[in-house]
Image: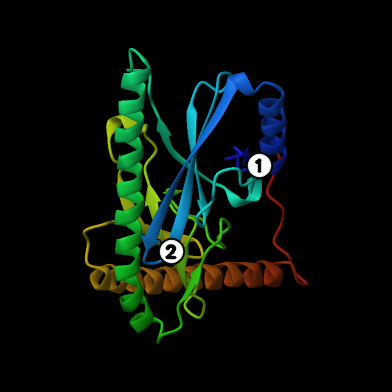
Amino acid sequence: MTDAAHSPDDGAAEELLRSALLDASAAAAVSLAVDGLPVSESVTVVFHGRRDLGTIQTYVAHGHRGAGETIAARELLRVPCDLDLGGAEDREQAAELYVEQARALRDALVGADTVLDVWREPLEALADGDVAVERTLELRTRLPAHRLLPVALVAPERQIVVTAVCGARTLAEGRPPLGIACAQQDLARVYPLPDDPERCLAEFAELAAEHARELAARLERQETSVERFLELSGEDPPPAPPLH
């Protein structure tokens, strides 16, 4: 597979690719397709290693990508769960570690996507059926954790985004910590995979309502503050404080 991107920044990624093409002996990319996912359908994992980076970075792209297919930088989601083959004493042990770690990541992707599918029906109930599957690297809301898959459930009317997230760690430490992030504008929560989606969404709806009330009260106080200041600045403004 020809890998055309290795950073969230397109320019840096393309430059990295050009460097790799100039010195292929210093870089390598290996891909792993994961099919049959209920929400994502299929994704391709790209492990990319360069001597000057010191890490074997992990990326996930939409779809089943075949050998020799070019993947652009804008199509790759950086997932901070990198390969670590430093414990291998020879090529055979490195191959064993690769299989073990790649399997751990594959299991994480399958598990997270399966749980995300379980969230779909409760989210549809909360949003009166208006839920879309967005296969995108860019979301309109910030998340408190790293994304694991380039897919999300989105309820446009409620402005709720639900997606799989993970903690940053090397795959040598085993399957990464996983969760489901539920976000709405500047409010976000991460729930463990085993949690009941209905309970989580009900809790999140309460948090969102409370957050909205607090925001409304804060805006009202700010408006009142400005109004009082304008009144003070009228015909008889208060004297300025003395300078010391």
User: Where is residue 64 shown, x and y percent of the image?
Assistant: 50, 55
Which quarter shows the C terminus? top right
Which quarter shows the N terminus? top right
Label 2 residue SS:
strand
Which residue in the structure is indicated by mark 2? Answer: 41
User: Where is residue 113 shown, x and y percent of the image?
Assistant: 35, 60
Residue toward you, 50 or 125 = 50
Q: Is residue 97 left or right of residue 155?
A: left
Query: Does the CB distance between marks 1 and 2 fall below 8 Å?
Result: no
**Colour scheme of this structure image?**
rainbow
Mark 1 neighbour density, 10 Å: few (under 14) some (14–19) many (20 or more): few
Does residue 190 show up? Answer: no
User: Where is residue 129 shown, x and y percent of the image?
Assistant: 41, 85
User: Please, is residue 89 above or below residue 57 in the view?
Assistant: above
Label 1 residue SS:
loop
Q: Amino acid at mark 2?
A: Glu
Does residue 86 show up? Answer: yes
Q: Amino acid at mark 1?
A: Asp
Which residue in the structure is indicated by mark 1? Answer: 9
| Residue drawn at point x = 73 percent, y = 65 percent | 237
User: Please, is residue 44 above or below residue 13 in the view?
Assistant: below
| Inter-mark Cα distance, 1 to 2 | 26 Å
Which of disc 2 and disc 1 is earlier in sequence? 1
User: Where is residue 37 shown, x and y percent of the image?
Assistant: 37, 62
Q: Quadrant of residue 120?
A: bottom left
| Residue drawn at point x = 45 percent, y = 54 percent | 149
